[in-house]
């Protein structure tokens, strides 16, 4: 437990910035080009969409951990914030996907 | 727990807000997959970029994303300068953040304007489904191209077209067909399309809460509601940032001995950026 030391200076901020920018650029290029091999169906959607969602979650993690500073907060506080979101949102998504499949089939 | 009260409460607010937005976006997903054949594909809807003629999918919204990430960066720099108690630096970075937020809001207004004004125009059938006119290759034609031929633009640019002219031009081109805008949408060859038009149909240009030229009505409703709700968050954030900026100039936090307030509002501002990352993915990419 205990607050973790955060990096000093501003170099780390720009590093995260370039990373977020690079991920966004990759998403936009993929969105425009739509490579043929990524359009295969997978888990009810296309591989491309899964890649988009994966990249989005990576971006979100970097924003929350570094920009919102959560990585350097108390461990207890970190879990107080992570748990409700990480349990409830996937749960809601799961319910709506299952229910949605039912509605769609009907 | 050794966490400051105000910061903790801001986090709890952000958790509840995250759940609200996840409710909106999952509801969007549910409706989209239910009405997939009539649901517009985002890259056919948001095609404008200032100063460039023709279809430019994703570019404009990528620019908006860049602006918001950039203003998130200037906010981190402001918080960072606050930790080092550099009043001048905090003020400058706050100002940069406010400018970034204002540019984003302006961009969103521009996007809404073009969405409301309309792009290629659509035809609403008697059963309320919206279809587009396509040429022999299945390429969707704008009303401008239908009426003016080769001299027409890929977008109507706000020009109003009479319904009778559009229908007459369609009738005169037996190679044209009507297509539903969504994935796996129906395609009606000319003869069938003509019988659909005769059963009662009307042209639609632009979008509002009741009907839109892009396809399923719900699409426009969700667009206005989700990007509007997010835009309202950005607007509130700009107001908070301005109050913060003003107090930094007055030296309020210098006297208080801590720039903790910059950190708390900073959390809110990053959250707004975080939500946009998801809106960008689920509205424009997927």
Image (tube, helix red, strand yellow):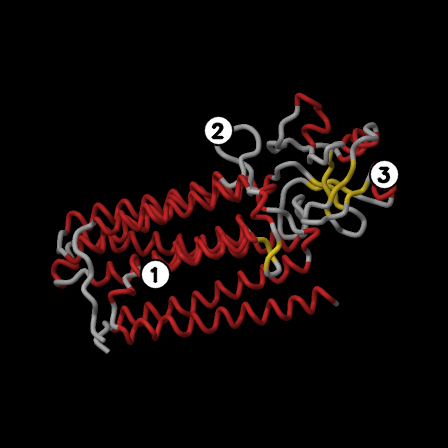
Measure the C-alpha gap from mark 3 to mark 1: 55 Å
Q: Position of residue B275 (x, y in %)?
A: 43, 57
Q: Circle 3: is it few (<14), some (14-19), or many (20+) Cα within 10 Å? A: some
Q: Is residue B243 left or right of residue B186?
A: left
Which residue, given by chain and number where applicable, does mark 2 sit on? B51
Q: Farthest residue toward the front?
A: A37
Q: Farthest residue toward the top?
A: B151
Q: Nearer the viewer, residue A42 or B184?
A: A42
Q: Is residue B285 left or right of residue B250?
A: right
Which residue, given by chain and number where applicable, does mark 3 sit on? B194
Going 70% across and 52% down the picture, which residue do you hit?
A: B37
Q: Position of residue B193 (x, y in %)?
A: 83, 40
Q: On what subunit does the disc labeled 3 rest?
A: B
Q: Is residue B227 visible?
A: no
Measure the C-alpha gap from mark 2 to mark 1: 35 Å
Which residue, given by chain and number where applicable, does mark 1 sit on? A64
Q: Circle 2: is it few (<14), some (14-19), or many (20+) Cα within 10 Å? A: few
Q: Circle 1: is it few (<14), some (14-19), or many (20+) Cα within 10 Å? A: some
Measure the C-alpha gap from mark 2 to mark 3: 37 Å
Within the image, what quadrant is residue B261 found in?
Answer: bottom left
> Height in image: B99 above or below A74?
above
């Amino acid at each position: 437990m205990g607050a973790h030391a955060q990096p000093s200076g501003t170099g780390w901020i720009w590093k995260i910035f370039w990373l977020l920018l690079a991920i966004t650029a990759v998403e936009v290029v993929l969105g425009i080009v739509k490579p043929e091999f990524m359009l295969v169906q997978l888990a009810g959607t296309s591989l491309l969409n899964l890649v988009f969602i994966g990249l989005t979650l990576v971006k979100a993690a970097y924003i929350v951990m570094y920009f919102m500073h959560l990585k350097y907060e108390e461990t207890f506080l970190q879990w107080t914030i992570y748990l409700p979101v990480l349990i409830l949102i996937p749960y809601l998504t799961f319910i709506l996907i299952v229910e949605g499949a039912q509605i769609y089939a009907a | 727990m050794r966490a400051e009260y105000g910061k903790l409460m801001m986090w709890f607010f952000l958790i509840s807000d995250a759940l609200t937005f996840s409710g909106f976006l999952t509801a969007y997903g549910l409706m989209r997959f239910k009405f997939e054949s009539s649901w517009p594909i985002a890259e056919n809807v948001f095609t404008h970029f200032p100063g460039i003629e023709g279809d430019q999918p994703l570019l404009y919204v990528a620019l908006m994303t860049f602006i918001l990430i950039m203003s998130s960066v200037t906010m981190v720099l402001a918080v960072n300068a606050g930790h080092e108690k550099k009043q001048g630096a905090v003020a400058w970075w706050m100002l940069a953040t406010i400018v970034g937020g204002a540019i984003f809001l302006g961009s969103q207004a521009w996007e809404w304007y073009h969405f409301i004004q309309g792009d290629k125009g659509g035809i609403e059938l008697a059963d309320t489904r919206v279809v587009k006119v396509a040429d022999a290759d299945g390429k969707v034609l704008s009303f401008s191209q239908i009426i003016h031929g080769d001299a027409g633009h890929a977008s109507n640019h706000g020009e109003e077209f009479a319904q009778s002219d559009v229908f007459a031009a369609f009738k005169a081109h037996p190679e044209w067909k009507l297509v539903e805008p969504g994935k796996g949408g129906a395609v009606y060859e000319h003869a069938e399309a003509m019988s659909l038009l005769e059963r009662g149909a009307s042209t639609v240009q632009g979008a509002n809460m009741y009907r839109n030229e892009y396809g399923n009505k719900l699409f426009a409703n969700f667009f206005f509601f989700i990007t509007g709700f997010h835009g309202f968050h950005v607007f509130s954030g700009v107001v908070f940032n301005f109050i913060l900026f003003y107090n930094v100039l007055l030296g309020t936090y210098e006297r208080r001995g801590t720039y903790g307030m910059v950190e708390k509002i900073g959390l809110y501002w990053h959250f707004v950026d975080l939500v946009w990352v998801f809106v960008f993915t689920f509205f424009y990419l997927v």
